[in-house]
Image (tube, rainbow, N blue to C red):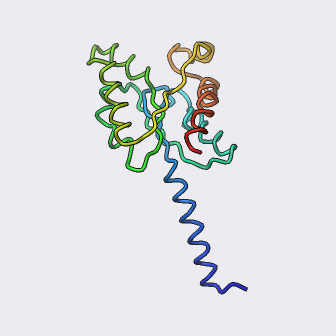
Amino acid sequence: MIPRTGLFLIAGLLALIACADHANAQIVAIGASNVAGRGVSSADAWPAQLEDMLAAKGRHVHVVNAGINGDTNAGMLNRLDSAVPAGTKIVLLDRYGGGWNGRRLGRGSQTAELASIEARLRSRHIKVIPMWWGTALRGYLQADHLHFTPEGHRLVAAHMLAPVLRAVR
């Protein structure tokens, strides 16, 4: 029989290991409204759906949703250090929404800002995985013809699953 203090020590070590595994695979999704989940619940946004899909595959990692409605590449660049904290291993980067918003507003060089975002992340040894966009998403848009339906978010998450699984191994 293990003494009570031994049980507490074992439980503490197991908790520490679980936290270390979580920290080693921290994932942040950053982008504009189709990352944030405009028009759908937070549970239906693709970062949350991806987290659920990862858990179903035995990868219990948290996917932080750092999407902001209406954000631009300049906005993402300005908030990069706060949105992507130390310890982050993987960033799922929306390469379209911020650029679309920036062009719509007539702000900055979207290509240069996106390149700066990627360079800063890589300089921090963070793996960058572009958010999947495909023509199939046209069939999964809300009435505004810009933002994904819950099914569209599920499609994005399903396409993101394989590259993220490879990155968290």
In which image quadrant can residue 40 be found? top right
Location of residue 127 in the rendering, given as x and y in whole percent from the top left corner: 46, 37
Location of residue 158 in the rendering, given as x and y in whole percent from the top left corner: 64, 30
Task: Tell me: residue 135, above or below residue 71.
Answer: above
Location of residue 52 in the rendering, given as x and y in whole percent from the top left corner: 64, 41
Task: Tell me: residue 70, above or below residue 143.
Answer: below
Q: Residue furthest left?
A: 108
Q: Residue at x 56, y 72 (%)?
A: 12
Q: Which of 152 and 63 lies nearest the eye of the viewer?
A: 63
Image quarter hosting the N terminus: bottom right
Location of residue 18 in the rendering, given as x and y in whole percent from the top left corner: 57, 60
Q: Residue at x 31, y 28 (%)?
A: 116
Q: Residue at x 46, y 44 (%)?
A: 89
Image quarter hosting the C terminus: top right
Q: Residue at x 48, y 38 (%)?
A: 65
Q: Which of 165 and 73 lies nearest the eye of the viewer?
A: 165
